Image (cartoon, rainbow, N blue to C red):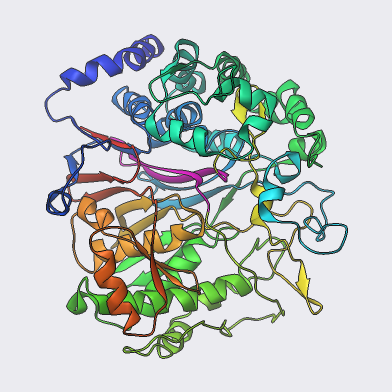
Amino acid sequence: MARKYFSLLARFLCLALTLLPLGAVAENLVPPPETTTAIAARRSVSASEIMIATANPLASEAGFAVLQAGGSAADAAVAAQMMLNLVEPQSSGIGGGAFLVYWDAETETLTSYDGRETAPAAATPDYWLGPDGAPIPFRQAVAGGRSVGVPGTLKVFELLHTAHGRLPWADLFEPTIDKAEAGFPISRRLATAIADAPDLADFPVARGYFFHTDGTPKPEGEILANPDFAATLRVIAAEGSTPFYEGPIGARIVEAARTAVNPGMMTRADLAAYQAKERIPVCLDYRVWEVCGMGPPSSGALTVGQILGILSAFDLTAIGDTPQAAHLFIEASKLAFADRARYMADADFVDMPTEGLLDPAYLGARARLIDPLRTMGVATAGEPPREHPEEFTSDRPRPRKGTSQLVIKDRFGDMVTATTTIETGFGSRVMVDGFLLNNEMTDFSFVPEENGVPVANRVEGGKRPRSSMAPTVVLHRGAPVLLTGSPGGANIIPYVAQALIAMLDWNLDPQVAIDLPHVVNRNGDTEVEEGPEAAALIAALSARGHVAEAADLNSGLQVIQIDGPLLRGATDKRREGLVLGE
């Protein structure tokens, strides 16, 4: 009976949203043009029991239906992720990987779940070196099966559901199966991504799905059905992840990755051996809060934590949202990214100084390197305390656009923040059974060593590439008060750190906080988000010695703030997300 009720609810929710019950609220982030004043006046959505924010309205609606039907945050996350795979295929899906941080209200415990892709077992450190011994160009590496890592998204969401689910696994796939068969209107963001994606039309299956027969990209508003994906989800709904990792779907994945250009190394044994993992969250005490997130192989929580830990030496509340605060943020980011490039990688393969990187004394010493009036230029990595010193050389991050973010709270008090990805937009461009495969192997360092000193994030068989994903939970007195995270490649780290400062130090409403223009520095030149305020900030930073320029900084932040019985939700105006609450 419950299953029948849920199925009907999921199918008709789009109509029901026009008659939301008393207390339900929604915000669509496909707004008309706004003035700066109007943007500053925006406020978050409020609710009292349940809330979800994702990057696409259809995904939010699918997850919200689950919450209304008595599902847990884990159940809603599964439903939302499957819908994101369908309607935002360029960003995430079962052909990629994910990190999740989950709060279990009954046990009052925080657990992180690692669904990061892995390198094929046969991969070696020279994986990205050409015949001449030099690294091949990044763009050349992306397209084709060689860039595909063993996918982890399906396995990690199955693990999450096993631990925290309340509704039947099969029920959670029904909204996406129905939508895949009936079709959905292509959003503006997806249409733009299709038109702008290099090499996408070079791959026959992707070309047949995203383009017309005359080669023109399918436009915004066109109805796009995906019966192949519906068939895939029917199998997974009935049998779990086994057909994907050990059965016929997996066999087709391996075959599809054997592309004519850049053929892949992944085998069926690699798929069968894949494991999603529970990991202990990485946490930092920041003023009166505890900021927790995903540890290695993600650098997200460590680097966000380092930025905040360094800035705890400064009174950001008194300084406020000023050019001086931007200067301090940039300098702290440089120091943190210098450590990230030197030390951070998959801790299952590298002796990571995780505790040392967040040691208060070490961060205090790093903070003393900051001149309040003048930039330090390029920062160098520090020497965090560690038991087993191991020498590494540094590598460099590259921004990405193929990622998504969701945050959820259920009526039982459980909460989840999840960052999910296929790496670059449209991943490897290889499509099979209705979904795209990731290009996560390009997140490894292309250069394995310099002068005989290894790079921590070099390719190794079975290793997980370093990530920047930073799904974050903020605790106060042992209870969650904030969930957040963002897509954006290495820029995820400053996006999340800046949003946390705006909400924690400046006490801004979540929507106002994530609407603030971004400032990004990954230990190089500074990027200031394009907009009416960019020129003045660039001038102020230039006076302090920074090399700064305006840039398109396309974050996708999602936020749920828990303030006693009140929930406040926000979704990034830079994308097309939706907050739903009740």
Quadrant containing the N terminus is top left
The reply to whether residue 289 is in sight is yes
Q: Is residue 374 above or below residue 188?
A: below
Main SS of the magenta part reads: strand
> Is 28 or 276 nearer to us in this picture?
28
Kindly identify the residue that appears in the image at 42 percent across and 60 percent down: 292
Percent x, y for residue 578?
29, 35
Residue placed furthest toward the right: 131
Q: Choose top left, top right, bottom left or bottom right for residue 364.
A: bottom left
Percent x, y for residue 580?
26, 33
Kindly identify the residue that appears in the image at 47 percent across and 73 percent down: 525
Q: Is residue 414 left or right of residue 383?
A: left
> Is 204 or 334 nearer to us in this picture?
204
Q: Is residue 564 above or below residue 73?
A: below
Q: Is residue 33 left or right of residue 457?
A: left
The magenta stretch spans which residues? 400-424
> Is 310 or 566 nearer to us in this picture?
310
Kindly identify the residue that appears in the image at 77 percent across and 32 percent down: 254
Percent x, y for residue 383?
58, 85
Q: Is residue 261 left or right of residue 445?
A: right
Q: Choose top left, top right, bottom left or bottom right for residue 136.
A: bottom right
> Is 366 or 147 nearer to us in this picture?
147
Q: Is residue 38 left or right of residue 332?
A: left
Percent x, y for residue 343?
62, 73
The reply to whether residue 355 is in sight is no
Q: Is residue 145 above or below residue 381?
A: above
Q: Choose top left, top right, bottom left or bottom right for residue 256.
A: top right
Instruction: Indicate whether residue 541 is drawn in magenta.
Output: no
